[in-house]
Image (spheres, rainbow, N blue to C red):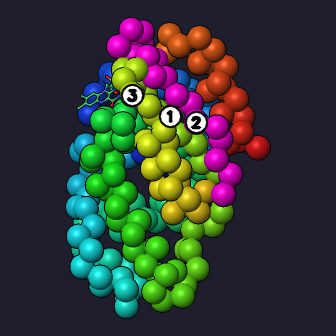
Amino acid sequence: MKTVIWNGSPRKKGDTASLIQRLRELLPGEITEIQAYSCDIAPCVDCRYCWEHSGCCREDGWQELEKTLLSCDNVVLASPIYFSEITGPLLSVLSRLQQYFCARFFRGESSPFAPKKGGILLVGGGDGSPRRALETAETLLRQMNCREIFPAILCHNTNAAAALEEPGITERLQAFADFLKL
Ligand SMILES: Cc1cc2nc3c(=O)[nH]c(=O)nc-3n(C[C@H](O)[C@H](O)[C@H](O)COP(=O)(O)O)c2cc1C
């Protein structure tokens, strides 16, 4: 079983990192974690190359990452909430998924990704609503052909308590790991 985890937090010992770490302890198989804040992948600039050609005209870390995405079974999107959204760098790197949307929409191709399972880990201080971040995360998972998405694990109280102190968090992460394993 292969799992790709997108980490949208800049904090190496922050709340997102702690949830990912706990999930990694529960999840067998090969795990690839991608750090949105340090991976060398440029954002999509809507150059429209992919309206007519397969692939992306930008050659950077994406092409290597694509191989991992093509062969994985699960995708986990993990992010803090910034201004009610997932973080900018995570959205920036995942904007490169636009090439697969264009392949379908403009060139009539099907998704190159086999059906996958997915899930979302979101943390927030507790301001506002997490709804927008959840919707964005789900849209991005669907672009990677995640057909089954586990109910999001949300810790929206980190101004007061660390995400790992959220009541029942270990059980929810265990249930998520079990869902990915099946
Ligand atoms: C620029 C910025 C914007 C934020 N916006 C929100 C927000 O809209 N809602 C919220 O609940 N928390 C917000 N937060 C708080 C973070 O989501 C919170 O501190 C989170 O635990 C950070 O996760 P991390 O430790 O994994 O990086 C914001 C924090 C920053 C730095």
- x and y percentages locating residue 125 in the rendered image: 36, 20
| Magenta-colored span | 147-163
Q: Earlier in the sequence, mark 3 or mark 1?
A: 1
Q: Amino acid at mark 1?
A: Leu
Q: Which residue is mark 1?
A: 121
Which mark is on residue 128?
3
Q: Is residue 30 visible?
A: no
- Label 3 close to label 1 by CB (< 8 Å): no
Would residue 61 appear left or right of 166 to someone viewing this image? left
Q: Say few, some or many: other residues with alpha carbon within 10 Å of mark 3 (under 14 / 14 to 19 / 20 or more).
A: few
Q: Which quarter of the picture shows residue 35? A: top left
Left or right of 78 in this view: 3: right
The kind of secondary structure element at disc 3 is: loop
Q: Furthest-front residue in view?
A: 128
Q: Residue at x 53, y 40 (%)?
A: 120
User: How far across and how far down the image is residue 122, in percent?
Assistant: 46, 32
For label 2, the crowd category at 10 Å Cα-Cα, with few meaning under 14, some 14 to 19 and many 20 or more, is some
Q: Is mark 3 within 8 Å of ligand 1?
A: yes
Do the residues bearing badges 1 and 2 touch, measured as CB atoms within 8 Å? yes
Helix, strand, or loop for circle 2? Answer: loop
**Residue at 56 percent of width and 74 percent of height:** 111
Any mark on residue 157, and which? none
Task: Choose between 173 and 71: the one closer to the eye.
Answer: 173
Which is more toward the observer, 9 or 73?
A: 9
